[in-house]
Amino acid sequence: MNAVLDNFLVGVLLLASVGYAVYKLGPRTLKRRILQTLSRAMAAAPVSLRLARAAQRLDAASAAGKAQGACGGCDNCGTEASAEPQSSSASSAEIKVPVAKIGRRTSAL
């Protein structure tokens, strides 16, 4: 009996681990669908389990990622950039540090 319970627990943990990896590494649309499905399942659960609030949070989390552009940032990728030419320093989010300015860390000990 203990071997069956052990195998069941190991299987559940492996399934949870694979599910977490797919959630973190998968595309955003898959993440949104997973959150929506979990939200609906929790909302359909009996009231005695008190999962309604968690279902609302999951539903809000699934709706939060809908309005992102292709890059994952703002929602206006390509529309304003072509209409207004910007200076290269204002549009670049990259910080450039000369290699000569990079020093070695010295320990304070």
Image (spheres, rainbow, N blue to C red):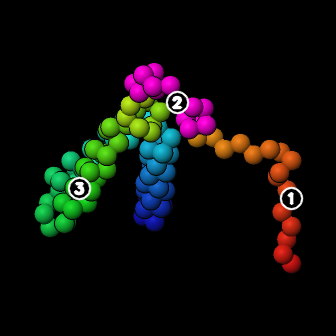
- Residue 73: say if magenta: no
Real-space Cα separation, disc 1 to disc 3, in angstroms: 50 Å
Under mark 2, the amino acid is: Gln
Could you say which quadrant of the image residue 96 lies in? top right
- Residue 88: say if magenta: yes
Which residue appears at 56% of the width and 38% of the height?
Answer: 90
Residue 7: tell me if it is visible: no
Numbered disc 2: secondary structure: loop
Numbered disc 1: secondary structure: loop
- Left or right: 22, with 60 as reference point: right
As drawn, which residue projects farthest toward the left? 47
Real-space Cα separation, disc 1 to disc 2, in angstroms: 36 Å
Majority secondary structure of magenta residues = helix
Front label number (2 vs 3): 2
Within 10 Å of disc 3 (Cα), the crowding (few <14, some 14-19, many 20+) is many
Residue pointed to by mark 1: 104
Span colored in magenta: 78-92
Residue pointed to by mark 3: 55
Residue 63 at x, y = what percent?
Answer: 28, 44
- Left or right: 107, with 59 as reference point: right
- Left or right: 23, with 49 as reference point: right
